[in-house]
Amino acid sequence: MASRLVPAAYLAGIVLVVVSTTASFADNAVSSPSEACQSYMAPLIVKTHLPLQTNEFLNPPQAWGTDSGVVVNAFVGLLDKQGKSVEVYPVVDLSASNTIQYDVLGRCKTAAAVVKLDDATTRHVAKLGALKIPSIPYFFLKIPVALRTPNQYAGLNPSQGDKIQQLLDRFADIGRSAVKDFVAEIHKRHMDDTLAVRFSGADVRFIAVDVEQKLINERLSKNARIYFGRFYARALCAWVNGVQENFPNVTVLLYTTPSTFGDYLNYALPTENDCLHGLPVWIARTTSDAGDVIRTSHSVIDKYSQRLCLQSAGNRCILHQYSHRGVLWSSSTADDPHLPHIDLDRLFPLKIVPDSAGSQYVRQ
């Protein structure tokens, strides 16, 4: 079946412009989808071990380090329940830990890359820009190890209002301090005007924040997870609000996992996580068959995914990281943890839905 992974020319009204590299989705256009790299369609037929038959893919249960997901040497499109292709755009996310063959990303008509602010940012953005692949920067919101031990939160209860407020304030300070680090990184790399996304007549700048840290020995205490989740949300909201003060036209894209949301952020009180309302989500969930993140099972992870993604206006998980084992310059039949691999993502067409509290960014 032909792929419906959509190259740049088919963004249905979405144009992403990288000012610093003069790249855009439109510049990355091809005359027809068939000119793009080979791609596959999920749900894939998957096995946990070799050998593989034609049209079968490997998803070994053993992680490659910490990386999981289907081993695949091309982007994976998506079929709906009726077997019809879903309009999606191929995206990668990169950091200093990746070994990249940039020409392959260009040849495969990668629609965009989400690039971590680290030692490789400048190189990635320049190389991608030369191929007219837009870059979206993302920042890792780090919580000090000393504040991730469960014992200090396990005994907290509502009667300890002063102590809880002190911890909320401390985590807010962490978020505000991280804003200064983020702004400094952006200025240092001359990325202030890195990107703008235009759709439905509106110009929006997207910056992603990585929120996935958990308690050490997190299963020791549910109470500790509840309170740490409240404090973590306070740090996140301090960061989001601070970034939007420095970059008024920015929309933050929240990168997180179903379990980080369900076991932590979900417990924040409305006054502690109001910044999360309407934020679009870049969800990290490596599904077994490279399919979509919303599943119909009753597993805890599926329930967490539904709570995170499904909002009153629609599905806000507009970007899905479906595999950490993309071997675009190798073979899908290799089970080798040392094989250079990258994260593969799919971007869904999106729309803005105004509501009483602002706007929600959801899939079309």
Image (cartoon, rainbow, N blue to C red):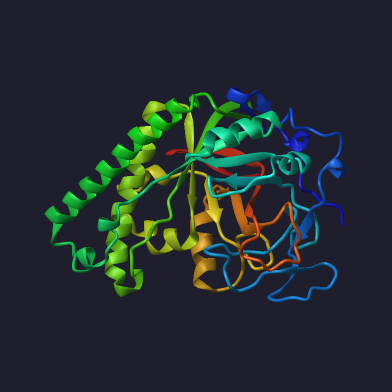
Front one among 332 and 360? 332
Count of all numbered marks drawn on residues in the image: 0
Q: Is residue 133 left or right of residue 156?
A: right
Residue placed at 33% from the left, 63% from the top?
Answer: 215
Residue at 75 percent of width and 65 percent of height = 44
Which residue occupies the foreground of this view, 155 or 178? 178
Instruction: Give residue 272's position: percent from left, percent from top.
Output: 30, 48
Q: Position of residue 54 (x, y in %)?
A: 85, 69
- Residue 248: which quarter of the image? top left
Q: In the picture provided, is 240 more to the left or to the right than 362?
A: left
Image position of 140 with respect to 40: above or below: above
- Which quadrant of the figure has residue 321? bottom right
> In the image shown, does 227 or 92 lie closer to the viewer?
92
| Front position in the image: 272 or 117 | 117
Q: Identify which residue is drawn at 22% across, 47% down.
A: 170
Give the residue furthest to the front. 338
Q: Position of residue 146 (x, y in %)?
A: 25, 57
Q: Quadrant of residue 154 in the image?
A: bottom left
116 sits to left or right of 52: left
